[in-house]
Image: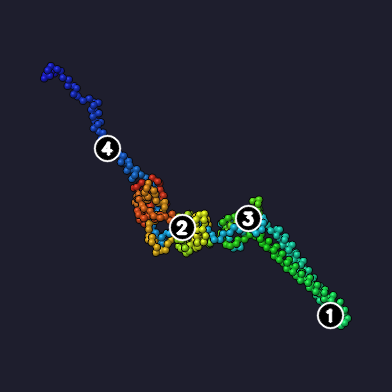
Amino acid sequence: MDSGTGGRKVDLSQLRISEEQRGRAGTGSRRPLVIGAAVVGAVAVMAVLVFGARPVEVRVATARSDSGSGAATLLNASGYVEPRRRATVAAKITARVVEMLAEEGMEVAAGQVLARLDDSDAQRRLAAARATREVAGAAVRDLEVNLANAERELARQVDLQRQGVASEQALDNARTAADSLRARLAIATRQVAEAEAAVAIALQDVDNCTVKAPFGGIVVSKDAQPGEMVSPVSAGSGFTRTGIATVVDMTSLEVEVDVNESYIARVVPGQRVEATLDAYPDWKIPGSVRTVIPTADRQKATVKVRISFDALDPRILPDMGVKVAFLAAADAPGAADRTVVPQSAVRRDGERTVVFVVSDGRVERRAVRTGPGRGGEVEVMAGVQAGEAVVVEGPESLRDGQRVKVGE
């Protein structure tokens, strides 16, 4: 076709769109739709992960209102449970253990036998002392008989001399014999007393072979076994025990803490305290200051303070670690109610302090402001109300809004 072209031939087939170009044009037009679908899918996956994932198990505790026993905390100190009466029972003699009756954890009464030692040598000394006493007693009886005869002879000589029959010399001899027997009888009597004392010593030696509890309490340590040698003094060889068992009077348990001398002016006898055992961080034990020991440790710059429990409990054991909060009077500032949570509920998130509160099966992350801690608990001044459940044990990856299941 050449009309209107000045004689040139026009190819209209070049105006058609090829299938390849048509495919590229279609792809470009669908790209926004594909991107939108991907975003929607990612959001859906995230929603499933956050809101539809399997709930994680956590342990919770209830934030509680605490009046601090009606008093504010003046200072905190740490120490140990100590008994006022603790005795490492030892033998008074050096001997071999033949029977051990004490066992750890056994309750004993005052005077109860803890161990028996070999008393064979002591028994022989006792037998010898008794024999000596019998000899001394027999000598006394012999002298008493002779003295009675000498006194009768003296009486006869006195009568004969009075009649002029006996000589003065015979009378003097009779008087001398009687006086001599009296002196010998006095000596023999003293020897009997000496023999009695020797028997008493031998009996004490036998008694020393039985080791007894000095007071009632609990055996906390068994320090010797049958067949071992025990002695009141340490032997150079190192094979001789110096103790039989350790007994603690459980009714005399108290707390001993070291208070920095800079704060000792805040502590007075009779002051109320709250003790918290490391083994039972949620248990507040009331007590009071028994005494402030009037001396300081120059190395540690501390003063020892002894604290009595208001009431004893079988869970309180010697040498347990304990933290003590010294309280002010009930009308002192800061005695108002406050909210406290376990220390394990508080987490650090960068510069913030947060807790996770459980509500309707999900956790809510809250920033909180904390105050002083005491006995495994910390005061929450803002962010948590008393009665709310806070997470005390759970994964570090907890997120705000995550589903949770409260475990036992």
Asked if the residues shown at circle 4 and circle 3 are in contact, with their CB atoms under 8 angstroms apart, the answer is no
- Mark 4: which secondary structure? helix
User: Which mark's residue is nearer the viewer, 4 or 3?
Assistant: 3
Give the spatial CA distance, label 1 vs label 3.
69 Å
- Amino acid at the residue labelled 4: Gly
- Work out whether residue 200 or residue 387 is closer to the camera in this orientation and state it: 200
Residue 188, percent from left and from top: 77, 69
In the picture of the structure, the residue carrying the numbered disc 3 is 242
Label for residue 158? Answer: 1
- Residue furthest to the front: 298
Which amino acid, by three-letter code, is at mark 1?
Answer: Val
For label 4, count other residues whose C-alpha is less than 10 Å away and answer few (under 14), some (14-19) or many (20+).
few
- The residue at which mark 4 appears reads as 36
Q: Nearer the viewer, mark 1 or mark 3?
A: 1
Say which of 131 and 370 sits in front. Answer: 370
What residue sits right under mark 2 in the picture?
Answer: 262
Mark 2 to mark 4: distance in Å? 69 Å
Q: Earlier in the sequence, mark 2 or mark 4?
A: 4
Element under disc 2: loop
Mark 3 vs 2, N-terminal side: 3
The residue lying furthest to the top in this view is 7
Horizontally, is 301 left or right of 366 in the view? Answer: right
Residue 286 in the image: x percent, y percent? 46, 61
Q: Mark 1 Cα within 10 Å, few/some/many (few <14, many 20+)?
A: many
